[in-house]
Structure formats: structure tokens, C-alpha cells
Amino acid sequence: MLHPVPPEPPSLQAQLHDELYREGCQILRPYLPLVNGITPGKPVDLDDIERGRRLLTRALDLSPNNWSAYWFLGMAARVAGYKDQAYEAFCRAWAINPNHVDVGRELVLQCCINGRGAEAVQVSGKVLGLKPDDAGLLSNHALALLLAGEVGRARFFASKATVAAPDNVAAQGVAQVIEDVIFGRMPRPTKWPWDEPEA
């Protein structure tokens, strides 16, 4: 009679990774933007955010394919105002897990924030392929197209987004800005949010 072989306990390295990852996420989770992808969940404490980021960076030294750790690093960098670091972290997460809608969505938004409209169009097209009827993804694609200068296509996707979810305030806002650009009421933005002053 064969006896099942008990699973081996996790290695010390795996245990350390899990502990660092868990603690880093626990520190950063309260800061994650809940409403619009930008506004932090609680007032930003840069020292606290840096502590969480250091823990996740150490976890990634032990397990460099942890896309979720890169996603958390990207979100934390965004709320701390580190646009380039947020972009780099989301790119790493997307490279590891290109079929995760939330990873792609955040990379698209970061491309828009960083004024990388053409790249946002490429990524948002791929993300939209994962969930073609999602009003938020349709609206994000419209936003990316607008920033990249493809205003006609942006209008088409914004219309699809507002039909898919007529009560989606963000989709309505993107559609309105596109109309304002078309009718000359505002210049075409090249980044989002468009009312953010240049540093």
C-alpha cells in the first residue's frame, strides 16, 4: 500500500518572501486609490509608503516573478507622486502577467498620466481584448486614443463606453472632453489628468 508523501515545507527563502510580501502589502493597502485610480485611500505618509516599498523590493529580490508585488509597488509609487517608478513597476507586472485585466488597466492609466498616449493605446487595445464589453476598459481606450491624437476613434470608443454603462461618470467625463476637443472648446490633452499643472 502506497502512502501519500507529505508536501515539503516551504523553504526559508519562500517563507521570508511571503512574510516580506504580506507585510509590505499590509502597509501599502490603505493608500491604494479606491475611486479614480489616483486619489489615495488615506492621506499619504511618504515614510510609511517607503517602508512598504522597501519590503516589497526585498520580496522581489527573493522572487522576481511576483507580478502582484510589482503592481503594489506601482500603485504606491503613483500615490507618492513617483510617476516614472510607477510606470516601471506596472511595466514589470504586465510583462509577467499580460492577461490580468487590473494589471493592464493600471499600466494604461499610468501611461496616460505620464503622457505616453501611443503606448497607452497599444496596451489598452490588448486589455480591451480580454474584456471587450467592459465600459471602464472601453473608456480607458477612448482616453488613450484621445491623448495619442486619434480623436475620431476616441469618440467611437467613448460612445461604446457610455452605451455599455450610461451611469458611469468617468466614461461620461471622457466622452465630454472628447466632444469639447472636437468642437474647439478645449485643446487636445496629451496626458491625464489634464487639469494637473506641470511640475
Image (cartoon, rainbow, N blue to C red):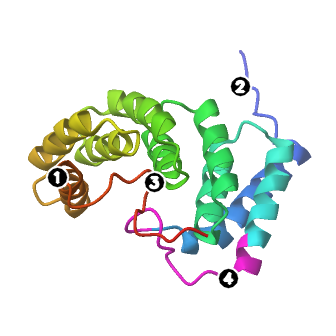
Q: Quadrant of residue 11?
A: top right
> Of discs 4 and 3, which sits in the foreground?
3
Q: Is residue 129 left or right of residue 156?
A: right
Q: Is residue 69 above or below residue 30?
A: above
In space, the residues marked 3 and 1 are separated at their CA atoms by 17 Å
In space, the residues marked 4 and 1 are separated at their CA atoms by 38 Å
Element on which disc 3 rests: loop
Amino acid on which the number 2 mark rests in the picture: Pro
Percent from the top left, x then y, of residue 199?
61, 70
Percent from the top left, x then y, of residue 75?
58, 59
Choose between 86 and 147: the one closer to the eye. Answer: 147
The residue that mark 3 highlights is: 191
The residue that mark 1 highlights is: 179
User: Which stretch did the figure color magenta?
Assistant: 34-49
The residue that mark 4 highlights is: 45
Percent from the top left, x then y, of residue 95?
62, 31
In space, the residues marked 2 and 3 are separated at their CA atoms by 58 Å
Farthest-out residue, front: 184
In space, the residues marked 4 and 3 are separated at their CA atoms by 26 Å
In space, the residues marked 4 and 2 are separated at their CA atoms by 50 Å
The residue that mark 2 highlights is: 4
